[in-house]
């Protein structure tokens, strides 16, 4: 029981549970937005009574595009909110904390040289060393 209690009391477990709860509540908001605004618009574009009836007919084949478009809109709304309300502010907060600790903005990360670049550099250094001898 002691190990279980320590596991439950860790901060990251509580944060994860909170994130799941908030995510579920946010999903309800996005679902209502899609169902109340975007679904009727998509149905109107396809001249359908509801989103499930929105189809694209190519010859004898009917494609149920309404539900797919609604799912894509749902995903884009969630992605935009997560980026603009969570990721972007968190990155700005981290940058400000870095500036407060170090007194300057963080240097942009430089990509590590490739193996070929390293081998070329070694070759050039060896050639220069031979010429000096």
Image (cartoon, rainbow, N blue to C red):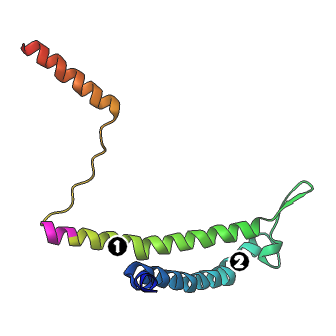
- What is the x, y in percent for residue 8? 44, 84
The residue at which mark 2 appears reads as: 39
- The disc placed on residue 110 is none
Residue at 42% from the left image edge and 77% from the top image edge: 85
- What is the x, y in percent for residue 24? 57, 83
Based on the displayed image, in which of its 4 quarters is residue 107 positioned?
Answer: bottom left
Based on the displayed image, in which of its 4 quarters is residue 41 positioned?
Answer: bottom right
Q: Nearer the viewer, mark 1 or mark 2?
A: 1
Task: Examine the residues drawn in magenta and state their main secondary structure.
Answer: helix
The residue at which mark 1 appears reads as: 90
The residue furthest right is: 60
- What is the x, y in percent for residue 7? 43, 80
Q: Nearer the viewer, residue 78 or 55?
A: 78
Q: Which comes sooner in the sequence, label 1 or label 2?
A: 2
- What is the x, y in percent for residue 127? 18, 17
Seen in the picture, residue 85 relative to 68 is either above or below; the reply is below
| Magenta highlight range | 98-102
26 left or right of 109 in image: right
Answer few, some or many: residues within 10 Å of disc 1's Cα (few below 14, many 20 plus, some between 14 and 19). few
The residue furthest left is: 133
Seen in the picture, residue 122 relative to 99 is either above or below; the reply is above
Seen in the picture, residue 89 relative to 64 is either above or below; the reply is below
Residue at 20% from the left image edge and 21% from the top image edge: 124
């Amino acid at each position: 029981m002691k190990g279980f209690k320590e596991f439950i009391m860790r901060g990251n477990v509580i944060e994860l549970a909170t994130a799941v709860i908030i995510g579920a509540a946010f999903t309800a908001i996005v679902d209502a937005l899609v169902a109340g605004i975007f679904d009727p618009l998509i149905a109107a574009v396809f001249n359908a009574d509801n989103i499930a009836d929105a189809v694209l007919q190519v010859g004898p084949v009917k494609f149920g595009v309404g539900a797919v478009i609604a799912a894509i809109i749902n995903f884009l709304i969630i992605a935009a909110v997560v980026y603009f309300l969570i990721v972007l502010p968190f990155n700005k907060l981290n940058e400000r904390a870095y500036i407060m600790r170090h007194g300057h903005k963080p240097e942009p990360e430089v990509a590590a040289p490739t193996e070929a670049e390293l081998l070329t550099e070694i070759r050039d250094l060896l050639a220069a060393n031979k010429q000096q001898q």
